[in-house]
Image (cartoon, grey):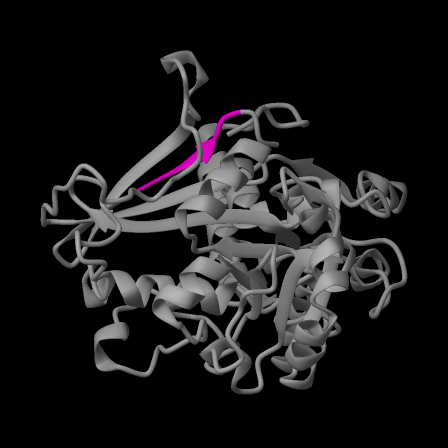
Amino acid sequence: MRECQTPCKDREAESRDERFMRMALDLAARARGRTSPNPMVGAVIVKDGLVLGSGFHSAAGRPHAEVEALNDAASAGLDVRGATLYVTLEPCCHYGRTPPCTDAVIKSGITRVVAAMQDPNPLVSGKGFSALKSAGITVEVGVCENEAHALNEVYIKYITTKRPFVLLKCAMSLDGKIRTALGESKYITSEESRCKVHSLRNEMDAVMVGVGTVIADDPLLTVRLTDNACNTGESEGMASSIRNPIRIIVDSRLRLPLDSKVLSGTSRTIIATTVTAEKEASHRALALKQKGAEIWPLPERDRRVDIVRLMEKCGASGITSILLEGGPTLAAAALSAGIADKVLFFYAPMIFGGVTVPGPVGGEGASYIRDAVRLDRVEVGRSGPDIWVSGYVVGID
């Protein structure tokens, strides 16, 4: 935990504050994948050790967590005057789709607000706390701050850079191969691992692959969480409805087959190509548009779509998070360009071998060990028989 901006409290009080803040964090996480472009926020109102009301922000345009908690207490006929509000993010103080939360908190008679972190949004940052303090409310910041940052890593990246948070996911054999010598790749990892990936798709705004992956595997890139094997608690608390992500296909030369599955269904499909390809293959671009796809012509770099410019375009279009599922060329480009914030690699307990069989990351590779992409905050876990490793790319804010 980062240092509090308030004097240190006695251990009992600190433990109590952390306990109620963790309740608020758990509430916030119930809306995982459903609040974009807003953050996930939870709130708990406590007086004399008793919870009077609680709530969380369920979706953009819906009431914020503080208001939901106040409404919860009011519906039970409970008086919150003199109570403490535990909230995972600084209360907003501006008019957006909803009125300022600070006004509701001040009007309620709450006398103490404990927040996990300051809101990095320039419209709010510090101003919400100032409004509360000006009204005579005691404000303390920093309880479970690291947990709050981790919960809203997508929001923090997007609101501070206007670019999406990118999670690079790869699946491979234990010796790092993504297919057999004859090209077989379905399925390397277990059903449990695939369910975990579908849960991630359900949380992210978009899923992105290279055209080579589409040509080789013809994926739908939708969410499938209806099987019993997927009911493992991985997405527990998430809104019950399934939300398919936007499908982004990086196709520098417009090679996407017109009968590809990614062109079917109701999910939005974006084809990121080069300005040159759109001009030289205008008939192809028109045919793809007629199939329902959006064409994004972008500048090129080394005769491929400039992936940095693609991220800028995604951010400007309100896409806050992307699950990048490969293949090797796109994975290498993402790491080389520095757009990947986090990686998640799945390893199946099998060995393929083969000198020419590709791994998950292509490109020229690192010339020296010092040139390697490094990770920190590394975690290791199991999904069925598989092992997964995740970490944050060093140097990415």
The residue drawn where x is 55% and y is 48% is 166
Q: Using the image as rendered, state which of residue 265 and residue 48 is in the foreground.
A: 265
Of residue 182 and residue 224, the one placed in the foreground of this image is 182
Instruction: Write down the quadrant of residue 376 in the picture.
Output: top left
- Does residue 111 lie above or below 342 as drawn? below
The answer to whether one can see residue 350 in this image is yes
Give the residue displayed 66% in from the left and 64% down from the top.
65
Q: Main secondary structure of the magenta part?
A: strand
Answer whether residue 390 is magenta in the image.
yes
Q: Which residues are magenta?
A: 389-394
Where 380 falls versus 265 (above or below)?
above
As drawn, the residue found furthest toward the left would be 350
Rendered location of residue 317, percent (x, y): 76, 61
**Is residue 260 toward the left or the right of residue 272 in the image?**
left
- Is residue 110 in view from this perspective? no
Query: Which residue is depicted at the point 64% across and 23% down?
Result: 7
Q: Residue 273's x, y, as percent?
A: 66, 58
Q: Is residue 7 above or below residue 83?
A: above
Question: So how many labels did they put on this image?
Answer: 0
**Is residue 7 on the magenta stretch?**
no
Quadrant housing residue 114: top right
Q: Closer to the camera, 197 or 79? A: 197
Residue 257 rendering spot, x and y as whole percentages: 50, 74
Q: In the drawing, does residue 74 fall left or right of residue 167? A: right
